[in-house]
């Protein structure tokens, strides 16, 4: 497998874009390679500019739950495009997508569209602060909520991969109201809430974490947070930018039956175009301008093209058994990986939920950020390369979840299992094992 053209483009890009990329994790830094330039996506496959073909487990970092170039998505997009690209005035597409989201998420009565997950988080936090009249925010180590200043504290994946826990350029006063605690540790939350009594506006988290690898919430973690929030008049915010529509039609809200005050969505809701969204009860959301006193706006918010790809994607997700089928494929894939690793006595764990997968080379699943940091990055780097040359495109960082799409078929799954087995066998042959 050659990467000649990709490498050449990368050298050119290095001259005009920092690190040659427009978002850090694309740079392949943590796997010690140059990024691969993509020419085309089709279904479950990516084809790069050198003509190499891969089975894609990144899917644009989550949005493409139907795979690349889904016919119904492309058709809807083309039909919308024929009438123009943006009007800065309402279209019925916004109404259609809003209704679909509300149908999926029982806790959302009213919502606002944005252009990214980052923006949606900022809007939600501002609204929560206004609604509660309080300033402090609790987040969790290893959870990522976009790149806004006050949330770049122990923010997982991109930042972790680069070894930068906190970004420069963020004044300490901007993070003074952010409290970052250990994930899955209810006692830490209870203690912090007590210490800052009457000051916490919101607790925000990824209800299944996906930006430090994939981490499931412990049994009573979410319901425990709900109880604390109810007692202390704190808003509970689920950042479901990654998990929304992916782990189940109604995301973690549907799975865990814990009702948050606000939900943040992104990625899949835009079906591959830039969208974010935040929503909650009527009472909370009516605080937003133009009817309320919280300002939030966007020139391209609710953009017709982005609404179209979102609508077409959600319609397919709402078909019966959509997630059942994802779950079945994910189960075969992850349990087969486990078998292959066990055969070679290589420590390994895996987990999945709908079309979201996690794995790592240690015995037990990680429960928090500190455990994530204990993973052997060097082994992953070598493993990643072995998989890549066998035509499997994994997220180029150990601190990311893997994404399965509806277009991954049995053959893809089989090929991926074989590549996994061959990759770890090859490393074992060279006496390379995870530490
Ligand atoms: C990707 C992500 C975001 C940020 O969304 P962008 O569209 O990249 O701004 C926020 N929260 C979570 C949980 C995410 O996975």
Image: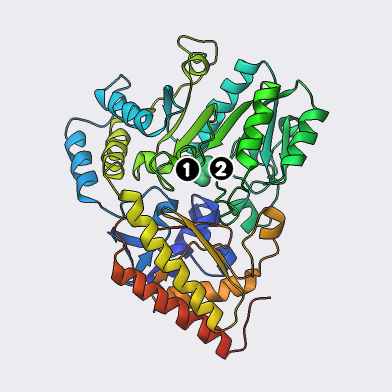
Task: Identify the mark at residue 207; answer none if there is no mark.
Answer: 2
Q: Residue at x 70, y 50 (%)?
A: 165
Question: Mark on residue 255?
Answer: 1
Q: Which numbered mark, 1 or 2, is in the foreground of this view?
A: 1
10 Å crowding of disc 1: few (<14), some (14-19), many (20+): few
| Quadrant in the rendering for residue 411 | bottom left
Is residue 192 in sight in this rendering?
A: yes
Left or right of 86, for residue 79: left
Front-most of 242 and 23?
242
Going by the image, does 45 lie left or right of 119? left
* Residue 280: % across, % down: 48, 24
In this rendering, the answer to whether 219 lies above or below 53 is above
Task: Establish if 139 lies above or below 36.
Answer: above
Mark 1 or 2, nearer chain start: 2
Furthest residue toward bottom:
429
Quarter of the figure that contains the C terminus:
bottom right
SS at circle 1 = helix
> Disc 1 to disc 2, how far (Cα)?
10 Å
Task: Determine the image quadrant of residue 388.
Answer: bottom left
For the residue labelled by badge 2, is the local secondary structure a helix, a strand or a loop?
A: loop
Instruction: Give the residue drawn at x 39%, y 47%.
Output: 63
- Image coords of residue 377 (percent x, y): 64, 68
The disc placed on residue 334 is none
Asked where in the image residue 130 lies, by quadrant, the reply is top right
């Amino acid at each position: 497998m050659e990467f000649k053209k990709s490498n050449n483009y990368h050298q050119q890009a290095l001259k005009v874009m920092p690190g040659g990329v427009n978002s850090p994790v694309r740079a392949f830094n943590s796997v010690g390679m140059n990024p691969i330039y993509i020419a085309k996506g089709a279904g479950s496959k990516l084809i790069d500019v050198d003509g190499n073909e891969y089975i894609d487990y990144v899917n644009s970092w989550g949005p493409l739950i139907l795979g690349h170039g889904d016919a119904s998505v492309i058709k809807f997009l083309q039909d919308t495009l024929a009438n123009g690209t943006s009007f800065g005035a309402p279209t019925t597409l916004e109404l259609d997508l809003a209704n679909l989201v509300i149908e999926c998420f029982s806790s959302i009565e009213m919502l606002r569209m944005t252009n990214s997950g980052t923006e949606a988080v900022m809007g939600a936090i501002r609204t929560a602060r206004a609604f509660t009249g309080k300033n402090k925010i609790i987040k969790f180590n290893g959870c990522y909520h976009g790149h806004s200043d006050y949330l770049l504290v122990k923010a997982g994946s991109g930042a972790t991969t680069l070894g930068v826990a906190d970004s420069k350029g963020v004044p300490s006063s901007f993070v003074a109201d952010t409290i970052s605690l250990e994930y899955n540790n209810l006692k830490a939350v209870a203690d912090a809430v007590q210490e800052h009594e009457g000051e916490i506006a919101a607790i925000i988290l990824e209800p299944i974490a996906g930006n430090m690898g994939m981490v499931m919430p412990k049994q009573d973690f979410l319901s425990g947070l709900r109880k604390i929030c109810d007692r202390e008049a704190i808003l509970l915010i689920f950042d479901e930018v990654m998990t929304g529509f992916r782990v189940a039609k109604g995301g973690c809200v549907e799975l865990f039956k814990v009702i948050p005050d606000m939900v943040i969505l992104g990625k899949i809701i835009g079906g591959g175009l830039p969208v974010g969204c935040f929503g909650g009860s009527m009472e909370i959301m009516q605080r937003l301008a133009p009817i309320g006193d919280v300002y939030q706006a966007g020139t391209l918010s609710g953009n017709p093209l982005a609404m179209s790809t979102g609508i077409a994607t959600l319609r397919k997700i709402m078909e019966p058994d959509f997630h059942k089928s994802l779950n079945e494929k994910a189960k075969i894939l992850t349990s087969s990986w486990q078998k292959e690793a066990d055969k070679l006595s290589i420590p390994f764990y895996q987990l999945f939920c709908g079309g979201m997968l996690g794995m790592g080379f240690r015995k037990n699943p990680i429960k928090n950020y500190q455990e994530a940091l204990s993973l052997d990055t060097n082994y992953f780097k070598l493993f990643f390369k072995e998989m890549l040359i066998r035509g499997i495109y994994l997220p180029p960082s150990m601190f990311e979840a893997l994404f399965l799409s509806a277009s991954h078929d049995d053959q893809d799954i089989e090929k991926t299992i074989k590549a996994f087995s061959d990759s770890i066998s090859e490393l074992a042959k060279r006496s390379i094992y995870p530490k």
